């Protein structure tokens, strides 16, 4: 007689759920953590601890020549009320510092404008690179060059082109009649921000273009062919068809760029040093930390910047509903 | 000794929304047997194999290989060798290195390793290919390397996870023969997973039919063919599928009578003493056991004939609303399409299944 | 109509190419001018002189700065790849509680503004006695190379076929053997890409290099270029600056051009697939 198991009804056997994973699984998990440990330790030491320390310093009166002797002073670096007596007093501290708020404004302005410009221009460049034409390889290589150049070098190259006396930018402007006299692009308060934006856009558009291009290349070619067959206007195709499909790639590219823009330092420091029109929050923090001998104040500024960026990131992720796991 | 025993094995996937994929499976696989796990997609056959291999955890139950309790042992310590569906060869290693890898990890001496690898290679006719990389090999060659890699470690049990699915039809037949010869030569216990019941019937000493994580029947191929324990197994084994005709039990006893839905009464050499008259019953009969006669016990209209050269499959409408009957006719003789016909359903070739699908014992003498 | 569209398209392409390449071209142009030629605006090469290059390479510490940058970036890459590969295996291949949270945390570290850790790192560097040493930079650069390396390598490792890993497990390979003997050879392209991107990031870094190093001969290239000063306080040696810039940039541009495709796939694996 053959061995059989009769056809029993569906749920006659209760589902057993183990109280813990098998030994095999537990061993694997253990080795997983073992492999992660070195990296985590380094990361904690290089990012976690210093961050906490910076936050701590913001609550003290630390000075560069006496870091270990710092005393806790609460929120004084952020906001304190100093009484002059007779009902007279003043607010001191970061939150009452007009220079800080100016820097805050500069940073936001810079970020919004640069990211917007880079997204739009990046999309245009990506669209160009996505179509096939003779010399596409050369153009793609050409477009990568600004990205490959170190920020400092870009700053210096443009600083030279924007030089008020011998710069080629002024030369072109005057020759074609756009300018009546040479402009001190990087020094003048009117044009400093513009100068910084120009260089940043020049330098970073390739990066955006690449990310957007990757998103574009994930759109199946058939969709465009159907649109062409249907005779749909290419601009409409872009807005109705392409754009929704690359939304995810765009969203990721934008947040990465925005974060970089919010913490910009190198470019400002080298291209327009000491200029109040371009001073961003990072610059203020660094100046206070190492130039004005206000280490604790600078730490508080660093902490505030961190909170701003963290806040914006969380907000963005929630709004854009980004999925970062990427599957198993 | 390389017998494999499964005792009340369960597998549940997921914590938040648990899925019970293997339900209370108990099997005893004798040393040296070639056992095939077969069943429709999603029945759990691959999962069961991987649990034996150690690539999936056993949620509950016990697994014994060669008498040892191996639930908590890593695959390499269980004495198993595995051949994967996609061969899973190491792409950057040569054929030689692929087959030597496991032995090197077990820290054998260079001479022993070399000897074992070369011996296996010549048995599988891989001699000239030892230095090649997998991407330079054909599908059949890669499969042989995959088998060779398993052989060199001299496992107690060989596990095959649908190894022929990626090959074309002709190659599949050839490799099937090679695997059968391999089993004859090595005599090891082999567990083989496939969804193809032809492979199962030709290769197996014993077959395990699985459905939705449960064992429907475990027995020799002929047993499953002649005495399926339920309707599922009856319909799964044998191609084309067994015909099922619904009806009511008219007479119980060692020989039964069934009144089909179209009113015709058929005799069946099946013992239904445990049932009562009036019970719902399904009569099963294989297409190869039917014939078209001038006078038969069921009449119908020919819908369509499929001519395959050596045989013809005739689809007959015997009652509206019911699935058509398939009759298999030997030879290339033409059957005139469309028109009435008579089918002869011999009593000793009938199977009877109750309302739950369980089979009644057959009383006919089986060859 | 089509001809009009085509010309417009190629005009756009031309504009893009010119805009992208002109500053670099102009820097090269300037670097080959010496003395008073610099003060004359030229659009096309008119004179040719290697004076700036000799000046940059023989006086000052520029050559030493180049070596410093090479040293620092290379070591950073080696350490990051090593730590990254082992971490990526755990994150890509092994299921464990908290994995998702961990991945997000690692990603979030790469979003830290460098300034936020500057104060704390400064104290740490001083405490370890690494101030004015290149090792301070090797340490500090981990903050952006590690998350990036882990992220990209995890994405690449996820794509490796699982059956090859299972075959190795059946053959008796431990996790370490799987990583070193089975996965590593298959991940060559990913390692090159990630290494290259990490190298470029380390090479370009400015803030930490400015803060932690005070001696000219220990400085790295970006800071060295930024601080290049002339004979008098108000004289900016544009010629030397351009020459130094070109020296630094040419190898980078060549590297990027050679590894174009790999770099693009690396960036997008990190960002888009992410």
Image: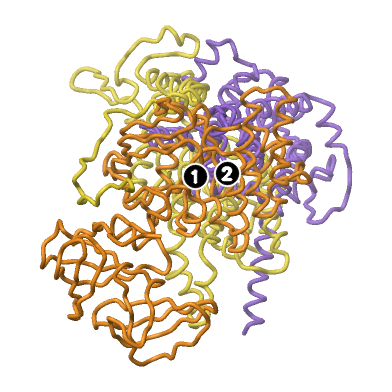
Chain colours: A yellow, B orange, C purple
Helix, strand, or loop for circle 1?
strand
Q: Can you give x and y, in whole percent of width and height, for residue C4 in the image?
A: 64, 80
Relative depth, front residue between B72 and A267: B72
Q: In the rendered image of this protein, does residue B137 appear above or below residue B246?
A: above
Q: Decide: few, some or many residues near mark 2? Use Cα within 10 Å; few <14, some 14-19, many ≥20.
A: some
Q: In the rendered image, is residue A288 in sight?
A: no
Q: Find disc 2 in the rendering and name its residue.
A: B183
Which residue: 44% across, 69% down? A241
Residue B26 appears in view: yes
Residue C193, picture quadrant: top right
Q: Left or right: C253 with respect to A206?
A: right
Q: In terms of image quadrants, where is residue B233?
A: bottom left
Q: Residue furthest bottom?
A: B339
Between A85 and B337, the residue placed more toward the observer is: B337
Q: Position of residue C8 (x, y in %)?
A: 64, 74
Residue at the image position 25 percent from the left and 68 percent from the top = B268
Q: Which image quadrant is residue C13 in?
A: bottom right
C249 on left or right of B88: right
Q: How many marks?
A: 2
Looking at the image, do the residues carrying marks 2 and 1 touch, with CB atoms under 8 Å apart? yes
Q: Chain of mark 2?
A: B
The residue tagged 1 is B34
């Amino acid at each position: 007689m053959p061995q059989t198991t009769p056809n029993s009804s569906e749920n006659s056997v209760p589902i057993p759920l183990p109280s813990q994973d098998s030994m095999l699984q537990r061993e694997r998990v253990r080795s997983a953590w073992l492999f992660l440990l070195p990296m985590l330790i380094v990361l904690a030491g290089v990012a976690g601890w210093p961050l906490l320390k910076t936050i701590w310093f913001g609550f003290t009166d630390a000075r560069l020549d006496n870091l270990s002797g710092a005393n806790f002073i609460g929120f004084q670096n952020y906001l304190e009320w100093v009484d002059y007596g007779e009902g007279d007093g003043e607010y001191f501290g970061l939150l009452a510092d007009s220079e800080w708020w100016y820097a805050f404004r500069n940073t936001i302005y810079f970020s919004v404008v640069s990211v917007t410009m880079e997204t739009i221009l990046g999309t245009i460049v990506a669209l160009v690179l996505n179509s096939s034409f003779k010399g596409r390889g050369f153009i793609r290589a050409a477009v990568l060059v600004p990205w490959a150049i170190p920020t400092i070098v870009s700053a210096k190259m443009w600083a030279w082109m924007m030089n008020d006396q011998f710069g080629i930018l002024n030369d072109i402007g005057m020759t074609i009649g756009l300018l009546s006299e040479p402009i001190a692009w990087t020094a003048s308060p009117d044009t400093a921000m513009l100068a910084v934006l120009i260089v940043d856009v020049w330098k970073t558009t390739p990066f955006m273009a690449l990310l957007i291009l990757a998103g574009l290349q994930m759109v199946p070619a058939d969709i465009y062919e159907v649109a062409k067959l249907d005779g749909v206007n290419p601009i409409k195709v872009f807005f109705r068809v392409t754009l929704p499909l690359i939304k995810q790639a765009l969203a990721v590219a934008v947040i990465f760029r925005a974060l970089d823009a919010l913490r910009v330092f190198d470019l400002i420091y080298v291209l327009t040093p000491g200029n109040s029109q371009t001073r961003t929050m990072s610059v203020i923090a660094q100046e206070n930390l190492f130039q004005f001998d206000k280490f604790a104040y600078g730490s508080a500024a660093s902490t505030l910047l961190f909170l701003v960026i963290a806040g914006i990131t969380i907000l963005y992720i929630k709004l854009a509903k980004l999925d970062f796991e990427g599957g198993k | 000794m390389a017998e494999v025993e499964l005792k009340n094995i369960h597998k549940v996937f997921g914590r938040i929304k648990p899925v019970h994929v293997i339900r209370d499976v108990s099997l005893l696989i004798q040393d040296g047997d070639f056992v095939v796990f077969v069943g429709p997609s999603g029945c759990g056959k691959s999962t069961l194999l991987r649990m034996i291999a150690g690539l999936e955890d056993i949620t509950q139950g016990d697994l014994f290989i060669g008498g040892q309790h191996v639930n908590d042992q890593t695959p390499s310590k269980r004495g198993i060798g595995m051949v994967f569906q996609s061969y899973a060869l190491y792409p950057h290693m040569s054929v030689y290195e692929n087959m030597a890898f496991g032995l090197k990890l077990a820290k054998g001496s260079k001479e022993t390793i070399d000897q074992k690898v070369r011996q296996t290679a010549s048995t599988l006719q891989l001699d000239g290919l030892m230095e090649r990389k997998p991407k330079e090999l054909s599908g059949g060659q890669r499969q042989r390397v995959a088998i060779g890699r398993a052989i060199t470690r001299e496992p107690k049990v060989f596990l095959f996870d649908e190894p022929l699915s990626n090959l074309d039809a002709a190659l599949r037949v050839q490799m099937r023969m090679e695997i059968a010869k391999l089993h004859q030569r090595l005599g090891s216990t082999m567990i083989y997973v496939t969804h193809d019941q032809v492979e199962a019937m030709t290769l197996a000493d014993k077959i395990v039919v699985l459905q939705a994580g449960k064992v429907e029947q475990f027995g020799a191929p002929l047993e499953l063919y002649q005495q399926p324990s339920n309707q599922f197994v009856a319909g799964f084994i044998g191609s084309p599928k067994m015909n099922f005709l619904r009806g009511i039990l008219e007479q119980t006893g060692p020989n039964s009578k069934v009144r089909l839905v179209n009113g015709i009464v058929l005799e069946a050499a099946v013992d239904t003493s445990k049932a009562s008259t009036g019970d719902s019953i399904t009569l099963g009969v294989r297409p190869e056991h039917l014939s078209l006669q001038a006078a038969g016990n069921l009449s119908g209209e020919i819908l369509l004939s499929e001519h395959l050269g050596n045989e013809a499959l005739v689809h007959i409408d015997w009652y509206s609303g019911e699935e058509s009957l398939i009759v298999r006719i030997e030879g290339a003789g033409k059957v005139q399409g469309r028109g009435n016909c008579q089918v002869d359903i011999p009593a000793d070739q009938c199977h009877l299944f109750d309302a739950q699908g369980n089979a009644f014992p057959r009383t006919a003498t089986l060859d | 109509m089509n001809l009009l569209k085509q010309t417009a398209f190629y005009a756009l392409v031309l504009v893009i190419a010119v805009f992208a390449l002109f500053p670099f071209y102009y820097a090269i142009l300037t670097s080959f001018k010496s003395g008073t030629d610099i003060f004359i605006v030229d659009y096309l090469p008119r004179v040719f002189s290697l004076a700036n290059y000799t000046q940059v390479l023989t006086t000052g510490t520029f050559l030493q700065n180049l070596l410093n940058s090479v040293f620092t970036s290379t070591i950073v890459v080696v350490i990051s790849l090593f730590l990254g590969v082992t971490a990526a295996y755990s994150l890509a291949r092994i299921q464990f509680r908290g994995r998702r949270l961990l991945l997000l945390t690692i990603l979030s570290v790469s979003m830290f503004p460098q300034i936020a850790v500057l104060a704390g790192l400064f104290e740490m560097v001083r405490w370890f006695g690494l101030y004015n040493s290149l090792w301070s930079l090797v340490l500090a650069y981990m903050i952006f190379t590690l998350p990036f390396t882990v992220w990209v390598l995890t994405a690449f490792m996820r794509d490796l076929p699982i059956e090859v890993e299972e075959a190795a497990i059946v053959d008796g390979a431990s996790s370490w053997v799987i990583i070193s003997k089975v996965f590593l050879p298959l991940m060559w392209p990913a390692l090159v890409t990630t290494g290259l991107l990490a190298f470029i990031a380390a090479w370009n870094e400015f803030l930490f290099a400015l803060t932690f190093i005070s001696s000219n001969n220990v400085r790295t290239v970006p800071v060295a270029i930024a601080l290049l000063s002339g004979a008098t306080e108000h004289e900016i040696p544009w010629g030397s600056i351009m020459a130094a810039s070109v020296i630094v940039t040419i190898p980078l541009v060549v590297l990027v051009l050679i590894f174009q495709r790999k770099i693009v796939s690396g960036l997008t694996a990190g960002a888009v697939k992410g």
